[in-house]
Amino acid sequence: MRIPIIAGNWKMYKDLTESKALAESLKNCLKDVNPEDTEVAICPTFTNLASVNEIIKGSNIKLGAQNMYPKQEGAFTGEISPLMLRSVGCQYVILGHSERRQYFGETDASVNEKVKVAFEYALTPIMCVGETLEHREKGITNSVVKTQVEGGLKDIPKEKAKNIVIAYEPVWAIGTGKVATKEQAQEVHAMIRGVLKNLYDEATANSIRIQYGGSVKPDNVKELMAQPDIDGALVGGAALKADSFEAIVKFKK
Ligand code: 13P
């Protein structure tokens, strides 16, 4: 059985004071969430990870980063290593978000390298895939997403792959208020699971959690989560406020 995973991607929002305040509120309002029932993670900016970790340590909220450089250490000015993420309490790391692909030149090959190294350092990747509006209008959504999934998972053995989280985030739905319909999302999620089955086997495909991301809000999360292949949500805007993130996490209520 796949435990749903709701993660908040805070992107480049919230300074130190604001991040700590949001973490405090979430710790408080999510304390009744059973992690066996719904897993919760928050992903603040690098500079606020350590302070947020101090607040949520020992709670049922896990910590994730938004990116990582795929080396343990070295002369890589401005970069952050997996060991550094581990040392501030991260268990998750978002990799290959469409904003990183769009603005920072990330490719399936660079995402794949990061996925491999994240696993080496016991970080669980949340690997993002998703088509642009142009891809969707051209009718090539499935082939684009399939290429991203296969590229990101290249040479990742099934023992590791079974623990990855994949986030399907249609680029046209991110930050636009235009959510994919539950049917559109389910169709791509099922396609991704089929790709995983081909790459690995049925048991592995069935154990991998696939999140949906793109304008997830308290009022649409329930119908999305009711789809058989949607196992969680990667939330941007609505993760920046405790009440809306709480409502999303508690989608079963
Ligand atoms: P929004 O929820 O703001 O659309 O962002 C989604 C996203 O990119 C999460 O990674």
Image (cartoon, rainbow, N blue to C red):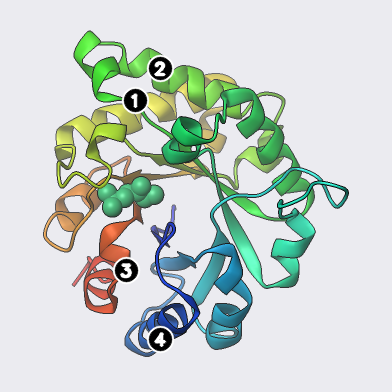
Inter-mark Cα distance, 3 to 1: 24 Å
Depth check: 122 or 198 in front? 122
Q: Secondary structure at mark 2?
A: helix
Q: Position of residue 33 (x, y in %)?
A: 37, 79
Q: Are the residues at dot 1 and dot 4 in contact (C-beta closer than 8 Å)?
A: no
In the image: residue 62, left or right of residue 118: left
Q: Which mark is residue 240?
A: 3
Q: Amino acid at mark 4?
A: Ala
Q: Secondary structure at mark 1?
A: loop
Pick whichever of labels 3 and 2 is earlier in the sequence. Answer: 2
Q: Position of residue 97 (x, y in %)?
A: 47, 41
Inter-mark Cα distance, 2 to 4: 39 Å
Residue 180 lies, with reference to residue 236, above or below; the image says: above
| Residue furthest out toward the front | 77
Q: Are the residues at dot 2 and dot 1 in contact (C-beta closer than 8 Å)?
A: yes
* Residue position for label 4: 21
Q: Which mark is residue 131?
A: 1
Q: Is residue 232 visible?
A: no
Ligand 1 is within 8 Å of the C-beta of the residue at disc 4: no
Pick whichever of labels 2 and 4 is earlier in the sequence. Answer: 4
In the image: residue 1, left or right of residue 157: left
Inter-mark Cα distance, 3 to 4: 11 Å
Q: Residues within 10 Å of mark 1 (few under 14, many from 20)?
A: many
Q: Amino acid at mark 3?
A: Leu
Inter-mark Cα distance, 3 to 2: 30 Å
* Residue position for label 2: 144
